[in-house]
Image: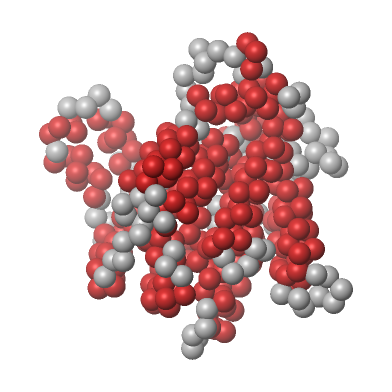
Amino acid sequence: MANSIPYLIFTAIIVVLYFGELGRIKGVSKSVSINLAYLVALIFIGLRGHVMTDYVNYVPTFSRIPNITSLSFKGFDALEPGFVLYTSLIKSLGFNYFGWVFINTLIDFVVLRWFFRRYSPSQVLPIIFFITFSGLVIEFNLYRNSKAIILFLLSFPYLIDRKIIPYIIINLLALTFHNSAIIFIPLYFILNLRIPIWMVWTMVISANVIFLCNIKIIGDIINNLTIIQQLDGYDKLMAYAGGVKPASFSIGFFERLFAIIVFTVLRGKLIEKHKYYCAFYNSYLIYYLVYTIFYEVPVFINRFPVLFVYSYWILYPAIIYLKYSLRRIINMAVSLLVALKIFATCKQPDYAYENILWDDISYSKSMIKTQRLLENSN
């Protein structure tokens, strides 16, 4: 429980500043509230110590990457070239690992603020949903993915305005930071589609039947397609699709079910308000279907849905501002969901928070702690 306290305090501060944005705090202007919210987020996330687990890989990786004057991509085959060049440039400016982390966060929040200003009725409220839905994981653990996602968000206006050349260029750049960004390119032809509502409900219901009846889609495809069986990675694919516990009800299952029902019921009202909500809704639909249909491949649902989690950050603030008959009840349910999710997620041992401003950060000590956590999880 103690691990979740810093995150709950952080979220509470953002909530207070959201009320300041609404003009409900005497003597605090909207602009001051917004600026303070992003400053607090930058300090909390950008000045963190060794939180979660991926620092174990990125601290030595940062130390190995040379300055720009002696940069060579040899020896970095596992890393995308854009990420190596980007890191080398920052290192050449004299920053250490924690300076690099801070700049990563600063860039992300500059883009996020622009993105939220453009597509959300509030600039502060989306930060709360960013904290709640995978934003912390992206910032703390997914250093390469985060830049690919941020570049995709920068390309979003070109997707909405149907300008394919700048959209493709930006997402090809994203591909140089993480190969998962390849999925963003075909989205240009998908996300703006107004899918008939009967088809949406059919997909949602079918996905739940697959999930609840433990129908193993991936395993069946692998077993029945000869061409896949002849691939070098066949055994690895079977390992990914095997040994998974049967699907069952969980808090995550009900949270996603609640979201898809609310977003789908209100989809028409959202799109009437702004056409770009169609793309955000379709993003969440993909997120939901992947989680529900491909439950049997943990490595897939751990890596793929996070590319679409930005839809939460936009859709929940949108429905909070939307006018409809059950608005008050839904908003209360969403508020409760946010509090419970942050508490339940951030109480995990790997979320133990530390900040370079007041903690003595030691890579070796953090490594010992992380190794113990990984041993206990196994």
Percent x, y of residue 370? 64, 35
Percent x, y of residue 8? 71, 61
* Residue at the (61%, 61%) spot, across then down: 117
Q: Is residue 114 left or right of residue 255?
A: right
Q: Is residue 216 left or right of residue 256?
A: left
Q: Is residue 287 left or right of residue 205?
A: right
- Determine the image quadrant of residue 200: bottom left
Q: Is residue 245 above or below residue 51?
A: below
* Residue at the (39%, 42%) spot, across then down: 165
Q: Is residue 196 visible?
A: yes
Q: Is residue 275 above or below residue 326?
A: above
Residue most extreme to the bottom? 325
- Determine the image quadrant of residue 241: top left
Q: Is residue 236 left or right of residue 129?
A: left
Q: Is residue 284 above or below residue 25?
A: above
How is the protein colored in the picture? secondary structure
Percent x, y of residue 147? 55, 39
* Residue at the (75%, 69%) spot, across then down: 30
Q: Quadrant of the N terminus?
A: bottom right
* Residue at the (30%, 41%) spot, across then down: 242
Percent x, y of residue 89? 65, 24
Q: Is residue 284 visible?
A: no
- Determine the image quadrant of residue 374: top right
Depth order, front residue of 81/57: 81
